[in-house]
Image: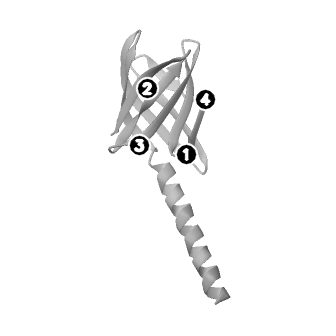
Amino acid sequence: MKFAIRCMFLVAGTLTFVAASTMDSRFVGTWSYTITDTPEGDFKGEMVIEKSGDTYSGYLQNDQGQLPFSKVKVVDGKLIFNFNYEGYPIVGTVTESDGGLKGNVAVEGEQFPLVATKK
C-alpha cells in the first residue's frame, strides 16, 4: 500500500512539473506585436522570447531597431519583461489570450495595451 501511494505522488509530481514546463514554454517564439494608444502613436514589430534551461531572454524588433529585454520571467502565468526606451524603464506584462498574448506596457505610471500573435 505504501508503495502504491509513493508511486501516485511520484506520478503526480512528474505531471505537475511537465505541465508547468509546458505552460512556461507557451510564451517562447516569435510574435507580431502592436502597442497602441501611446503619445507617440502605435508601435508594431516582432517580439522574440527565448528560453534556455530556466532562463528567459528576448527583445522587441521594429523599424527603429532592437530593444533587448534586461529581465524576463514568468510569474503566476504572466510573462513579465523589462526594457528601456529612450532612457525610460518600461515593464511589459502579458498573458495568453485566445491563442495570442494580451497585456500592457507600463512607463511612468501610464499603461498602454499590447497584443501579439504568434508567427
Quadrant where the C terminus lies?
top left
Q: Secondary structure at mark 2?
A: strand
Quarter holding residue 80: top right
Q: CA distance from mark 3 to mark 4?
A: 21 Å
Q: Quadrant of residue 39?
A: top left
Q: Element under label 4?
A: loop
In this picture, residue 62 sits left or right of residue 1: left
Tag 3: residue type?
Glu
Q: Is residue 69 above or below residue 25?
A: above
Q: How is the image coloured?
A: one colour
First in sequence, mark 3 or 1: give its number: 1
Q: Which residue is mark 4?
A: 70
Q: Which residue is mark 2?
A: 61
- Residue assigned mark 3: 96
Circle nearer the N terminus (2, 3): 2
Give percent across and percent down for residue 89.
59, 19
Along the line of sight, which residue is nearer the eye, 110 or 22? Answer: 110
Q: Nearer the viewer, mark 2 or mark 4?
A: 4
Q: Are marks 1 and 2 in contact (CB under 8 Å)?
A: no
